[in-house]
Image (tube, rainbow, N blue to C red):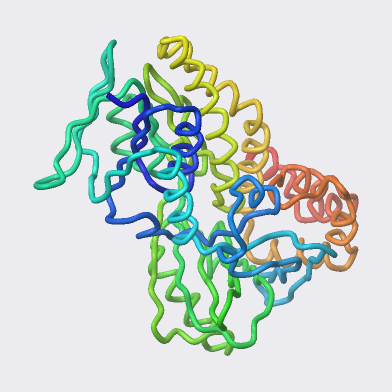
Amino acid sequence: MYDVAIIGAGVVGSYMAGELARQNLDVCVLEKHAEPGYKTSCTGIVSSECLALLNVTEDIIQQESRSAKIFSPSGNYIKVEKDITQAYVLDRPALDRVLASRAVSCGAEYYFSTPVTNIIINKRKVQIEAGKNANHVYIDARAIVIACGSIPALIKRLGLGSYTDSAYGAQAEVSCDSITEVEIYSGKQLAPGFFAWLVPIKHKRAKTGLLCSNNPKLYLNNLLETLEKQGKIRRAGYKISFGKIPLKPLSRTYKERLVVVGDAAGQVKPTTGGGIYFGILSAQVATKTLCEALQQDDLSARNLSRYQKGWQKILRQELDIDYWAHRFYSKLNDAQMNHIFDIIERHGVHESILTSPDITFDWHSKVILDVIRHRSLQKALEKLNLDNLVTKTH
């Protein structure tokens, strides 16, 4: 009988396993893959705040970034830059392994190659059936944490509803000789409704990928072909990875003896698809809630509802504004994007906003509100007759 069983050995699952084990709780982690970091389609870009929470060594960092070029559909670009490092590109498989190793050193037990096949929750405990053949196990726990990424069938089977909006992330690691800073690309041909990226890392390599609502392999191949023709990358020896990303959180992220955390809960930035930082913040709330509930021996849905109230207090407004911005952006055509881009560049909107001390890598709502309130851009929206679009999106 474990105190807590965690499904998923990704960043959020292993981070939470370590935090719970430090509280002298009996914790196990079940992972369907043979090892941590076996499969990930995440670019691994985090802020200094997130890096501090993860507390990893420098060898996990593949690149530091203080600037980026953002390209319009027409190919023009603006450069955003600050004096200090704004983001770090991490080796995601290595990060997963480090966090898992840290959790084990704190006392957590791991079951690899052990996919969960059944979960039964009753008044006394959680019963978990997992694995197959030699790895077939039955595990009992007082509580369970779902931290295994977006798995709609499992979420629905547990009675937690469904994801109302989602996207696909697709990415490949390629050779890259000449690109030294992050590049972001927009346009309906490359990534309709979303954006694409090229992120240089060590040893003349780069991560290039995109978000899209469908056909991720098609759009990623188109992106790779485009960047190769431009001489920015070489595709030799590349490997494509895919992942589904919720763009809105679940309406309910708890029930009796259960909490859902990270991508599985939809605690993801709708603007970028990034989930590491928000997942860690939510994991901290979940850890505190579970520790108190276990000590009280009260794992009722009512008592665990404090978890949802806690993470929503931190993230709900941010997620709502970010999602509105995504929906607004997704409805623009290339001509409208080019015009807005030209206004931003001509009037230095990006430069005036970057000087604000409130602008951070992780919290996008302030940037979004500052942009749409900028006088020059408001005039552009009126000229393009986008007021109705803004109202509909909101």
Q: How many numbered dots are placed on residues in this image?
A: 0
Residue name at image x 45 percent, y 39 percent: 106
The C terminus, quarter of image: top right
Q: Is residue 5 left or right of residue 332?
A: left
Where is residue 188 drawn, in percent x and y?
56, 65
Name of the residue lying farthest toward the left: 133
Q: Is residue 87 left or right of residue 155?
A: right
The N terminus, quarter of image: top left
299 shown above or below 328? above
Res 279 quadrant in image: top right
Residue name at image x 84 percent, y 45 percent: 358
Where is residue 57 drawn, in percent x and y?
60, 59
Q: Nearer the viewer, residue 62 or 304?
A: 62
Q: Nearer the viewer, residue 113 or 217?
A: 113
Where is residue 292 drawn, in percent x and y?
51, 17
Residue name at image x 51 percent, y 67 percent: 209
Where is residue 99 drawn, in percent x and y?
48, 49
311 shown above or below 226? above
Residue name at image x 47 percent, y 39 percent: 18
Q: Nearer the viewer, residue 108 or 14?
A: 108
124 shown above or below 332? above
